[in-house]
Amino acid sequence: MNMKLEVVIIPVSDVDRAKAFYEKAGFRLDIDLVNGDFRALQFTPPQSGASIIFGKGVTAAKPGSIDQLVLAVDDLDAARADLVARGVKMSELFHFTAGPFNYSVDSPRVTGRDPEGRSYFSFASFEDPDGNRWLLQEITTRLPGREWESTRGGATNVATLAELLHETEQHHGDYEKTHGKHNWWEWYAPYLSARQNGSSPEEAAGAADRYMER
């Protein structure tokens, strides 16, 4: 059985204001449907497989009542800087005292990155005009078993893979010039993973550099 999270409904009070905000944030507008007093808009975050829908007559939930919508990013600093440049008011980077999403303790959030530099543990946040809250969660390496095996048939596109490996080798060369002896495959792996998940070559190189620093 193939089952994917497709859409999350969020409640807003002013549809056009929300539309302007998500366009400014760089989300892709997929649908703006009007039918009498009903209006539904669908937006998709960059490279996301899931979307959000909001509008008039879409939900009876209180505007701004969605507390945590999580966006996974492989470079938290770059993602935060991009949103700031787009005019989105962002929090500073933070981590959770007792681990991701744990609000069961006093003062659950602490300013600054996770001191151990762990994947999944560093965050930043922003809100839309109604107060629906978004979290950026930095995921540089996924835990085992956190990705579904592909069920699609067909042979691997060898030419595409060869081109990507050549690109990886070229960017790794820049890293080699300024760093000591290391295992090349440890740099290749996060670079390839980032590129295959939609990052630009520069973003992928940054992700690989940070992985090696840790």
Image: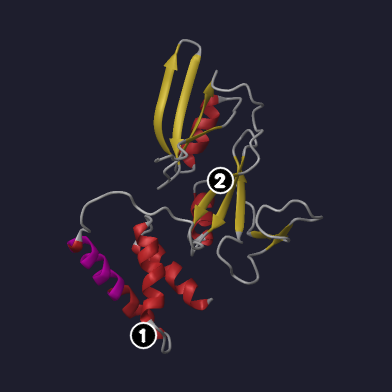
| Residue ID at (34%, 76%) | 172
Q: Within the magenta stretch, is there residue 162? A: yes
What secondary structure predominates along the stretch shown in magenta?
helix
| Front residue of 54 and 177 | 54
Image quadrant in which the N terminus is located:
top left
Residue type highlighted by circle 2: Val
Badge 2 crowding class, 10 Å Cα cut-off, few under 14, some 14 to 19, many 20 or more, is some
Give the percent coordinates (x, y) of residue 155. Answer: 20, 56
Q: Quadrant of residue 114?
A: bottom right
Q: Left of 38 or right of it: where is 133?
A: right
Work out which residue is located at the far bottom of the displayed protein and give it: 181
| Residue ID at (50%, 37%) | 22
Work out which residue is located at the far left of the displayed protein and give it: 159
- Look at the picture and state if 206 lies above or below 186: above
Work out which residue is located at the far top of the displayed protein and give it: 36
**Circle 1 — which element?**
helix
Q: Left of 105 or right of it: where is 3?
A: left
Q: Quickly name the residue at label 2.
A: 88
Magenta stretch, residue numbers: 159-169
Q: Quickly name the residue at label 1.
A: 177
Image quadrant in which the C terminus is located:
bottom right
- Look at the picture and state if 47 lies above or below 119: above
